[in-house]
Amino acid sequence: MRKPDALLRRVAAEAGIKLGAHYGVGMVFLNRNTVLADAARADLRAELEKEGLTVAGWRVVPIDPDACGGEARKTLPHIEQLFVNAPANLLPEAFERHLFIARRRANLHIRSRDPVYYVLSLSSRVISWKGLVMPAHLPVFYRDLNDERLESSICLFHQRFSTNTLPQWWLAQPFRYLAHNGEINTIRGNRNWTEARSHKFSTRLLPDMAQLRPLVNMTGSDSSSLDNMLELLTMGGMDIFRAMRLLIPPAWQNVEHLDPDLRAFYEYNSMHMEPWDGPAGIVLTDGRYAGCVLDRNGLRPARYVITADRHFTIASEIGVYDYAPEQVVAKGRMKPGEMLAVDVETGRLLTPTDIDNDLKSRHPYRRWLRGHVQRLQSLYKIEPNLEPLSADALNAYQKLFGVTFEERDQVLRVLAEAGQEAIGSMGDDTPFAVLSGQPRSLYDYFRQQFAQVTNPPIDPLREAVVMSLETCLGAECSLFEESSDYAPRLTAHSPVLTEGRLQALLDNPGGRYPHRRIELHYPVGEGLRNAIERVCDEAVAAVRGGATLLVLSDRAMTPDTLPIHALLAVGAAHHRLVRDGLRCEANLIVETATPAIRISSRCCSATARPWFIPGWPTIACAI
């Protein structure tokens, strides 16, 4: 909710708290253990004072515990409001950042000892009331919400029942910026890449960003992690429009009629942030703008109504706000990938077209990309003719890399003869790999997660528009800055590389993509652990030496060596580079014979084929 200034000033005065001309207010869940609560208050106060802010006082929030159910009462926290005064010469935007930094630093060391502690909001612009109560009981539980003095021009409300997390007070929605209906299917990748990019994020507005890591919640609610990322981007200097278009972009790669300047905006930004993808209907506010965003598939509905008394209501269905039909000025529904917003300070409705026109015109993105983007498919003309392996060599490689008769007959043969994926029955009675008595591929130990298998399949016509496998290669840059210097990149329409594309890539087009080949085999006496650690050391040394492409290859096998499974090598190298802050300086190119069946695509970010099958693409996966 946009900060209800009149109410807060009155209740603060009633509590003996003197507020300055510019102040912030926080809603805080505290432990009912007074020792832990006092420690949390002290630590939060200390961090605020480090930022040059003054704690004006604390107020116990009046509540009615009878509005809670039995389980909610067992975990009911102590709830207080914190009032913070800003120095007279501090700008509002800077005040928000100081509140953010203090809250994040305090959270890092308080939550480790006190899991009840949670700051719902700490801002000079917005305030949050939420809890583990039924939606109709929220204004009963929080008595302030029934106070006639409460007035606000923005209100976000979300009725959300937990599906893949246990209900907890702090997980109730909305979060600090947004409320989210849906799920982020790519959440594990988004969190891991945020951790990797945290070493690249750089902005003068947050000079000590290293103190705030991890930048997003690495476990728990996907909506909470998305909210963390949105907050970080806005505190780093972005407005909510560019931030949300980076996080949840519309379909743009395969939309033929898309405005060229708008396409350039999305292409320029696509290299430095992957989409947080999944069904999503999101409402959000930063205190000035109230907006709504749908995912590129439009898998969550959003309908809006504008009435003559200048009320704008948007929700998943019509009827959440009572109005007479004759009062309706306009109504409609949002389309997939659209963003709609209201500026309450000017009273202006920002349509999807308004937002797109603003974003595309901020910089000459199309001119920046012209001459700086290379397309991999344009760098070679024909595929090289490779000599087929002898029958003995083929049999040896199939045994070495674990290609079974079933895979050859039921999967590979169908692909080779018809260019189609094999069709099987719905039932799968194959034992989990960890319980199987047979040798299994390492890929078999990985399974899809809950949210990745619960959504209905998309029809092929829509899928052709909204799905893309386009991959960017090259060192990433900080997304907080926009410049023509950050435009160079090499793009491939798929992360699966043929032999011709791999050779064209390794020829170092434009001199910007030096590579280093790392062999994935080792002498028997070295041992697997030592071999993997050596591969990681070589990867780190190569990136520090200027390599932009790391080619992990198991092609050059010899009779006296053993292969390191590509999945182990890629995972180890990836996480070592993340740990050393180097992952976004380089791309991993995997040339391997291991991904023989479809399940491997879930682990390697590509659907690949064995390099020892004549006429098939090289297994080179750009990650």
Image (tube, rainbow, N blue to C red):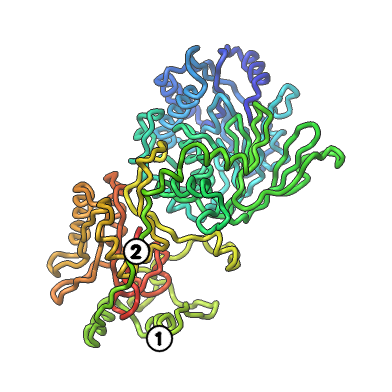
Q: Is residue 58 visible?
A: yes
Q: Residue at x 23, y 86 (%)?
A: 390
Q: Position of residue 535 (x, y in %)?
A: 21, 58
Cβ–Cβ under 8 Å for marks 2 and 1: no
- Name the residue tied to disc 2: 621
Q: What amino acid does circle 2 point to?
A: Cys
Q: Position of residue 414 (x, y in %)?
A: 44, 83
Rendered position, 246 above or below 467: above
Which quadrant would the C terminus be assigned to in this image? bottom left
Rendered position, 113 above or below 54: below
Q: Is residue 196 visible?
A: no
Q: Nearer the viewer, mark 2 or mark 1?
A: 2
**Nearer-the-camera pick, 563 or 514:** 514
Q: Residue at x 22, y 60 (%)?
A: 532
SS category of the residue bearing label 1: helix
Rendered position, 553 above or below 169: below
Which quadrant would the N terminus be assigned to in this image? top right
- Name the residue tied to disc 1: 409
* Alpha carbons under labels 2 and 1: distance apart: 24 Å
Q: Residue at x 34, y 82 (%)?
A: 404
Q: Is residue 586 left or right of residue 460?
A: left
Q: Is residue 75 left or right of residue 309?
A: left
Label disc, if present, on residue 161 of the rendered structure: none
Q: Earlier in the sequence, mark 2 or mark 1?
A: 1
Q: What amino acid does circle 1 point to?
A: Asp
SS category of the residue bearing label 2: strand
Q: Is residue 308 left or right of residue 510?
A: right
**Nearer-the-camera pick, 349 or 378:** 378
Q: Position of residue 409 (x, y in %)?
A: 40, 86
